[in-house]
């Protein structure tokens, strides 16, 4: 396990910064990381071996520490290559009491042969936080088709002053981003436009995908 030093971490941050995910907030935060490592908004940890049960307490501490420092927790697994690798990763994480792995029902944009998988983390306040997954797999939505398998989440609270919320669930929209409202609204509107275009053909349900971590072939998805 390494903290941000492996070349895969730099590669992934550059991928985010260039807007390939469609999320302009992710691009903004990734560019902040590139400016200085002294005040990273994304805490990136790279696992070079298969995740094991004994690694789960370390992941718990990293997520909680990232939340305390107002950082996104990002875990990279650059040596994972296949849908079965991703399914095994999800099953390993679900051995920890604060991770929940479940299937998500398809909406209008159902794709035959693929299943939707959700990973949720229980924050220190007891709220569920939905993790976003990335993988270099054709089954993944194009906005999540990244160079490496990765999982990212925000495990703090509803701390985005520009998007107040009374929902019990926590998501990336709740992350505290240090910009004024005009700049925030520009990123928000740009993200909606870019994501809508990217997910238009082949069609994907952008709202449903907020609750989805991975999209995997049926034969490898968790039951």
Image (cartoon, helix red, strand yellow):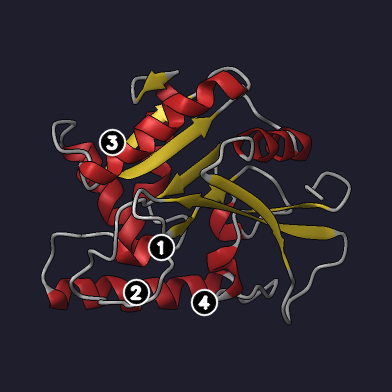
> What residue is shown with label 2?
190
User: Which residue is rendered at x = 72% and y = 78% of the image?
Assistant: 107
Query: Badge 1 is on which residue?
Result: 171
Residues at marks 2 and 1, CA–CA distance in whole angstroms: 18 Å
Q: Which residue is mark 3?
A: 65
Q: How many marks?
A: 4
Q: Callout 2 environment at 10 Å: few (<14), some (14 to 19), or many (20+)?
A: some
Mark 3–mark 4 Cα distance, whole angstroms, equals 33 Å
Between 190 and 111, the one lying in front of the other is: 111
Q: Is residue 157 above or below residue 183?
A: above
149 versus 101 height, above or below: above
> Which numbered disc flags the more N-terminal residue, 1 or 4?
1
Of the two numbered discs 3 and 2 on the same chain, state the one appearing first in sequence.
Answer: 3
Dot 4 alpha-carbon crowd within 10 angstroms: few under 14, some 14 to 19, many 20 or more: some
Spatial CA span between label 2 and label 4: 10 Å
Tag 4 residue: 196
* Residue 26 relative to residue 40: left or right: right
- Pointer 3 and pointer 2: residues touching (CB < 8 Å)? no
Helix, strand, or loop for circle 1? loop
């Amino acid at each position: 396990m390494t903290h941000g030093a492996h070349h895969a971490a730099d590669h992934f941050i550059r991928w985010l910064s260039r807007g390939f995910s469609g999320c302009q907030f992710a691009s903004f935060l990734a560019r902040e990381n590139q400016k200085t490592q002294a005040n990273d908004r994304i805490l990136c940890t790279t696992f070079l071996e298969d995740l094991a049960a004994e690694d789960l307490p370390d992941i718990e501490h990293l997520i909680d520490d990232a939340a305390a420092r107002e950082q996104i927790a990002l875990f990279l697994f650059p040596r994972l290559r296949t849908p079965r690798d991703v399914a095994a990763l999800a099953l390993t994480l679900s051995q920890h009491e604060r991770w929940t792995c479940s299937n998500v029902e398809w909406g209008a944009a159902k794709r035959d042969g693929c299943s939707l998988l959700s990973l949720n983390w229980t924050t220190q306040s007891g709220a569920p936080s939905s993790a976003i997954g990335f993988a270099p797999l054709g089954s993944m939505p194009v906005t999540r088709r990244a160079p490496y398998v990765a999982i990212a989440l925000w495990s703090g609270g509803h701390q985005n002053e520009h998007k107040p919320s009374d929902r019990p669930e926590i998501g990336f929209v709740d992350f505290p981003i240090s910009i004024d409202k005009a700049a925030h609204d520009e990123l928000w509107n740009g993200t909606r436009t870019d994501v809508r275009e990217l997910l238009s053909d082949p069609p994907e349900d952008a709202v449903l995908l907020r609750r989805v971590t991975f999209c995997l072939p049926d034969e490898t998805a968790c039951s």
